[in-house]
Amino acid sequence: MLIHYSPIAMAEQITPGAAVPAGASPSGDAPFGLIWLSSKEEISSDAVVLEAIDDQTFGQTYAATKVPKVLADQQSTFLSFGFDNRLIRIAAIGKSNDNDHYGSSIRARYNDLQRILESKYGKPIKRVDSTDKYYSGDDYAIGLSSNKNFLASMYHATSITISLRGTANGTSTAWVIIFEHDSGMADLEQHKKAKEKETL
């Protein structure tokens, strides 16, 4: 479920933040030592191990291990190549914080990651930090899990959109960071529309 989460969809849920900053990311460089628009063969040749998953929401998608660079608490990495074999989306998921009822662990780590992203990409263009009055205190994680509480921010740099979110499954929390290549994602949507037209 976590890899289905999209920064574009998040924009409908959260309130505007600061203006879009000048681009901070080189056009070809992707996070974790990867290169945007690389083919899966090119990425595999760099010792990254790709295992296909049964999900084509973002085209051909793989669980990736032996990625060149990862965060210390990064549990999983998913790479999506659209339908034309170009890297257009990277989703990273942090290790689970078990029994994080109050959300103290996820909030602390979220704040750390937020500072890092802001230092590289500028202030968020969208952000939300809201707690439902019925899901505060030791029910905070349950609120995240049931989409009653929200902890998220979105950033934009030259050619890419980045989102950071705190998530939960019951009382276990984790962070999710998603990077999307703007033109690559636009091509993906065009492909989907063309396929729908052919189908109908």
Image (spheres, helix red, strand yellow):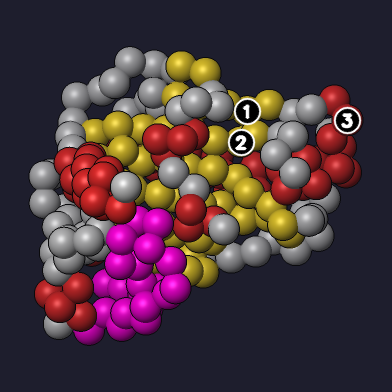
Magenta region: which residues?
46-68
What percent of the width, then of the height, locates residue 71? 42, 63
What percent of the width, then of the height, locates residue 180? 30, 46
Q: Give neighbour class at mark 2: few <14, some 14-19, many 20+ (Cα, 10 Å).
A: many
Residue closest to the eye, 193 or 37: 193
Residue 46 seen by the camera: no
Residue type, label 3: Tyr
Residue name at image x 17 percent, y 41 percent: 183
User: What residue did someone put label 1 on?
Assistant: 129
Give the secondary structure at mark 3: helix
Q: In this rendering, would 100 be left or right of 106?
A: right
Q: Quick check: marks 2 and 1 in contact, CB under 8 Å?
A: yes
Residue name at image x 17 percent, y 56 percent: 36
Q: Earlier in the sequence, mark 2 or mark 1?
A: 1
Q: CA distance from mark 3 to mark 2?
A: 16 Å
Please tell me whether residue 8 is drawn above or below residue 189 in the rendered image.
above
Residue name at image x 44 percent, y 44 percent: 6
Please tell me whether residue 19 is drawn above or below residue 149 in the rendered image.
above
Q: Quick check: marks 3 and 2 in contact, CB under 8 Å?
A: no
Q: Earlier in the sequence, mark 3 or mark 1?
A: 1
Please tell me whether residue 63 is drawn above or below residue 149 in the rendered image.
below
User: What residue did someone put label 2 on?
Assistant: 151
User: What residue did someone put label 3 on?
Assistant: 134
Taking the view exactly as shown, the residue that stands out farthest to the front is 200
The circle drawn on residue 107 is none
Q: In this rendering, would 147 be left or right of 2?
A: right
Within the image, what quadrant is residue 124 found in? top left
Residue 134 seen by the camera: yes
Q: Give neighbour class at mark 3: few <14, some 14-19, many 20+ (Cα, 10 Å).
A: few
